Structure formats: C-alpha cells, structure tokens
Amino acid sequence: MNANKRVAINAMATYGRTLLGMVLGLFSSRWVLQSLGDVDYGLMGIVGSLIVFITFLNSVVTGACSRFFAYSIGKKDDDDLVRWFNVAVCVHTSLAVLLVIIGAPIGEWAIDNFLNIPADRLTTAHWVFRFSLFAAFWTMFNTPYIAMFTATQNIAEASLWDIVRILTNFVFVYWLTTYTGDAWLVYSGFTVLLAVSLSIGQALRARYAFAGCRINFSYWGDRDRIKQVFSFSGWSLFGSLGYLARTQLPAILLNKYYPPMRYSYVNSSYQVGGALASYTQSLSSALMGAFQPQIATLAGVGDKEGMLKTVMRASKFGSFLMVIMAIPLALEADYLLVLWLKNPPLLASTFCRLVLLQMILDNLTFGHMSGIMASGKIKWYQITTGSLCVLSVPVAWLVLALGGDATSVSWVIAGCMAACSVVRLFFGRFLLNIRIVEWAKMVLFPILCVSFVSFIAGLGVVYAIEEPSFLRIIITSIVSCVAMIVASWFFLFDQSEKNMLNRMAVKLKLKKQ
C-alpha cells in the first residue's frame, strides 16, 4: 500500500470514529452536565487536571518511544523494533510504579489544601482522584502496546477500539440521567472500569497482531537505548510542561480566583466551552494523527523531500478542517449551546470562541512541529516553546490579579499559541529548510482568504435571518462550508491536489454508471 493511500485510509477511519464521537458526545456531555450539575461538572475537570499533571512524564516518554518504533519500522528492522518495544515496556512499567508512590500523596494533599472544593464534595473528590490514578496506572503500563497501532499505521483498528468505548460510554451516560445518588462518583468509577478493560484488551490484541510486541526480559536492561529514550524525552519535557501549563493550569487558576462556592458558572463555563470547541478540533486531529506516523517514517528512511511535502500538507489541511468547522460554530455558539444544554453556563460561548481561536493558531504550524520532532533536533525548540507556554501562566495570573475577568485567561493562552507558531516557523527554517515565505504562500495566505470568504458568507446568513433557530444553524453551516470549499479551489488547493480530486470525481462517476 502506497503512502498516500495509507494516509487516506487512516484518515477516513479516524474521521468515522471522530464523527461518531462528536454526534454521541453532544448528547452524552449534556446528560453528564445534567446529572452532575454545574459544581461537580467543573470539579471533575479540576480533579482531572491533577491526574494529567501526575502522568505528564508518561506522555513525554510515549512520544519518544513511538518515534523509535516508527524509525525501526521505516528501516524494516524487526529485531530493532522488538528491542525498542521491550525498552518501552520497561520504562513505562517503572513510571507506573513511580506514579503511585509519588503522585498519590501529592494529589491527596492538593485536594485538601490547594484546590477550592466544597466541604461536602471532598470525600467524593478523593475517591474520584483514586479511581483516576488507578486507571492512569494501567494505561501507562499498556501504553507501548497501544502505541504500536500508531507506529505501524494500523490506525483503522485502533479506531474500532475507540468506537467501542464511545458506544459503551453513551449507553451508560444515558442511564446516569435516571440515577439519583452520587452521579460524579458513579460516573468516574464506570469511566475508569471501561478505560482499564479496553486498554488491557487492546494490549492483548497488539501482542497477537504485531511481531514487535514480544516480551524479552534480556532487552529490558539495554542502558544505551534507555538513555536514548530519556535523552530525547529530556528535551521533550520542556514542551510537555508547557503544554500542561497551557491546557491544565487555566482551569486551576480560575478555580482559585473564582471559587465554585461563589462562582459555580465559571469553571463549568470553561469546561463546557472547551468541550464544544474540542469537537471541532477532533476532525482536524484525526487528519494529523494520520500524517504524524507518515512524517516520522519518511524521516526514518531518509526521504527528506517526501517528508517536507507531507509537513506542508499537514499544516494546510489541518488548518482547513479546523477553520471550516470553527466558523459556523463561532457564529452560532450561543444558540448551539442552548440547543445542546438548554441552560448553558453563562460564559460558555465566549470560552468556546476563544478556544477555537487558540486551536486555529496552533494548527497553522502543526506540520512544522511534527517535522521538527521527527528530525530529532528538538533541544532548543522544546526549550523555547515550552518556556513560552509556561510563561503564559504567570502572565494570566498577573492579569487576574490586576482585575481581569475570567475570559482574559483564554486571551493570554491565544497570544501564547501565536508566539509558539512563530517560533515553529523559525525552527522549521533552520532545521528543515522550510522557507517562511513558502509557508505563508502555501498555508497562511490561502487559509486567510478562504476563512474570510467563509466568515462573510456565514455572517450574511446571521444578519439576514435575525431570529436564532435550528434552521438558521443549518443554513449558516451549509453556506459557510460551501463558500469555503469553492474558495479553496481557487486559493488553497495546488494543481496536484486539484488533479487528484478530479480523478476521484471521475472514478465516482464510473462506479455509478
């Protein structure tokens, strides 16, 4: 199977999974908010942030191990792949044990002494944290097995496991609306049980399907490879810390400055707005997930020209998919939230629009990020971008301390994402030899043009039909999307992409005849 066809199949598989998750997630999120209420829904995100912080080192090492998997597969060296897999299992097992020893007491202390949690919810918060810690332990242990699906570009099967999770969770959340007890505790317990069960099942399937998933304890003590993993991960640590600061600390800052006992709507608004925006990011992330292993594999076999083309297309089409969904969502966010939740938190639509802006700024240079990571020359890139993201936290804190409102935090994060994209451009120029002017010509200016056309078309519908309604949402979405697709033919697609679309259209016509 050629590279382009594999990317297309993986993209379609992830799109199917993502679309199903988006549709069912719109219902299940509403039911969860209805069952938990504003306070518990906001607290669920805060306690979840603790788990993310405790397990961040695992995510750093996972990226390094996946990269070495992809390199071995690109070189078609099965023994090398087995060695890297065993090193990954050794490292992740050690980290899982370390998680319990160090992370548990830190999380328990934070719940009691740092976070603003109502006294009557402290006991539940502790149990939710313990459930989540248990799930994190098993997930970390099974990570190398699950990473093999991505490294081998067998993303279609991985998507099936996600679909099972989505459907099972949907059925349970529907039942949760009829439950009259402690819904937060029961929901967290079920989520953990489901996550652990599926991760174990996926690990067993990986052992059966992939020759690289063979345990050989004699490979576990390979100090040189372990050193390489942590050497690569050491610089990734800066980037991961920055990512954590950007994604998790805003919720904690809002919890400290806007205690849920007095401002129950602030934390829930942040969680709901981010959740709605994340559905838009999902399809774009699906495409990126299909491109990433391909970029790493091309780098592994030394196909620099092919890698650079894939890098540019990842940025271009990732941004396109993000914007085409973000514009109608931003225009109709207020009424969409009313349809979705009936009584949405007060600031949810504002947070949603700001998170969409952050995602668009990030996607514009996603291909550069993947290419830089695949090159292995990440030291100064990670230090720079990680430092920028970490710096956004004290800046956001200062803004709040000076009297800024809750949404000012999201504006600070948006500025951080713009700065990180600029940094990626410069590192892409020096490490990958991608000229900034070329990126502006192939990605930035075309995206700005098609976004402007789409926004004006959608805004015209909003002004023409003043009364919000479901029909107006449909019309706005169709008009803005069609306008963007037509504009993309003239401003975004290059000649090779137009030729590919023409060939696909011809094949479809022949099949119908």
Image (cartoon, rainbow, N blue to C red):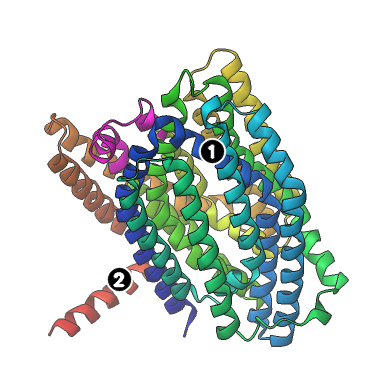
Q: Are marks 2 and 1 in contact (CB under 8 Å)?
A: no
Look at the picture and state if 35 lies above or below 14: above
Q: Which residue is mark 2?
A: 501
- Which of label 2 and label 1 is nearer to you? 1
Q: Residue furthest front?
A: 181
Q: Is residue 338 magenta?
A: yes
* Residue 316, position as x, y percentages in the image: 44, 56
Q: Quadrant of residue 50?
A: top right
Residue 340 in the figure: left or right of residue 445: left
Q: Which residue is mark 1?
A: 124
Look at the picture and state if 305 lies above or below 484: below
Q: Residue at x 57, y 85 (%)?
A: 208
Q: Quadrant of residue 85?
A: bottom right
Q: Say what secondary structure mark 2 lies in.
A: helix
Q: Residue at x 62, y 31 (%)?
A: 392
Classed neighbour count for the residue bearing mark 2: other residues with Cα under 10 Å, few (<14), some (14–19), many (≥20): few
Amino acid type assigned to the residue bearing label 2 in the image:
Leu
Residue 75 in the figure: left or right of residue 173: right
Q: Nearer the viewer, residue 497 or 145?
A: 145
* Residue 467, position as x, y percentages in the image: 13, 30
* Range of magenta residues: 328-351
Q: Is residue 95 magenta?
A: no
